[in-house]
């Protein structure tokens, strides 16, 4: 953005002009007379002017764009309402493969939709008993035991792709060697990552309450 454009935004901010939805559009903008400065486009993405406005005011940009809505499923196809009022298909469920096929619109739409993923990590437990006999067993440990946090990824991927990506992100944060050690009166155990084990990954899904403007509750479901 050039200096003149920033000065126009500063002037509108000082005059108390707030972002508003443009007529016949899903974009959000500052408007003064015939002058319009778009802050959020029809796709829901902030413009350079929008980022400058947010940085200058310290306020979050208002939600805009038809891609901010929740897709509606009819049969095996999901749709969103376009700016012209028509329905646009975003993806179609293929019953034979069990995978969604994304349209070009859907790829752009789901790229903006993100979810958080939690993991339970596969581990190998090597233990020694008091009589010096040893054992090995497969198990799992929650990510919280390693102070790992949920991972956020966009939704424009199939379930196998999302699962692989989330696994990759968690694997990159695993410490080398021992993950956990148990030492008590009955045994001594060392827990290490099991690369051949099965990860248990679940996604957090926001569910709107009847009167809530934001998310009212969060559900976890496994990625199959």
Image: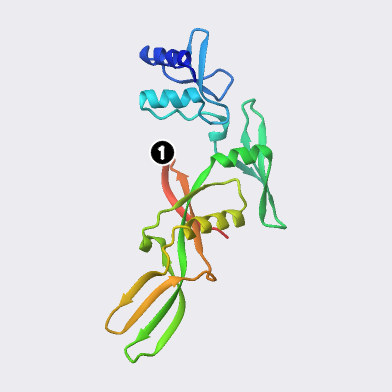
* Residue 70, horizontal then vertical, whole percent: 55, 39
Name the residue located 39 percent from the left edge and 82 percent from the top edge.
127
Indicate the quadrant where residue 214 lies.
top left
* In the image: residue 69, left or right of residue 120: right
Name the residue located 50 percent from the left edge and 64 percent from the top edge.
200
* Residue 142, horizontal then vertical, whole percent: 41, 64
Please tell me whether residue 59 is drawn above or below residue 217 in the rendered image: above
Please tell me whether residue 156 is drawn above or below residue 68 in the rendered image: below
* Quadrant into which the C terminus falls: bottom right
Q: Point out the residue furthest to the bottom here.
A: 131
Name the residue located 59 percent from the left edge and 38 percent from the top edge.
109
Instruction: Specify whether residue 222 is in view.
Output: no
Depth order, front residue of 134/66:
134
Q: Point out the residue furthest to the right here.
A: 96
* Residue 2, horizontal then vertical, whole percent: 49, 17
Depth order, front residue of 126/208:
126
Count the numbered circles shown: 1
Q: Which residue is mark 1?
A: 212
Please tell me whether residue 27 is drawn above or below residue 108 in the rendered image: above
Q: Point out the residue furthest to the top here.
A: 33
Q: Secondary structure at mark 1?
A: loop
Depth order, front residue of 221/16:
16
Q: Residues within 10 Å of mark 1 (few under 14, many from 20)?
A: few
Name the residue located 40 percent from the left edge and 57 percent from the top edge.
148
Depth order, front residue of 50/87:
50
């Amino acid at each position: 953005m050039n200096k003149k454009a920033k000065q126009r935004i500063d002037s509108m901010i000082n005059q108390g002009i707030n972002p508003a939805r443009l007529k016949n559009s899903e974009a959000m903008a500052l408007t003064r007379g015939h002058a319009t400065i778009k802050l959020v486009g029809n796709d829901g993405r902030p413009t350079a002017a929008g980022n400058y406005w947010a940085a200058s005011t310290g306020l979050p940009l208002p939600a805009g764009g038809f891609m901010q809505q929740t897709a509606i499923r009819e049969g095996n196809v999901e749709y969103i309402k376009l700016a012209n009022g028509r329905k646009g298909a975003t993806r179609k469920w293929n019953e034979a493969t069990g995978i969604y096929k994304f349209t070009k619109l859907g790829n752009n739409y789901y790229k903006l939709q993100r979810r958080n993923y939690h993991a339970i990590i596969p581990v190998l437990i090597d233990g020694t008993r008091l009589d010096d006999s040893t054992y090995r067993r497969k198990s799992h440990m929650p990510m919280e035991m390693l102070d790992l946090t949920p991972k956020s990824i966009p939704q424009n991927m199939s379930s196998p792709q999302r699962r692989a990506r989330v696994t990759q992100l968690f694997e990159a944060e695993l410490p080398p060697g021992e993950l956990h050690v148990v030492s008590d009166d009955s045994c001594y155990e060392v827990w290490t990552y099991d690369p051949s084990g099965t990860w248990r990954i679940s996604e957090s899904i926001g569910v709107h309450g009847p009167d809530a403007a934001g998310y009212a509750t969060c559900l976890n479901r496994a990625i199959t």
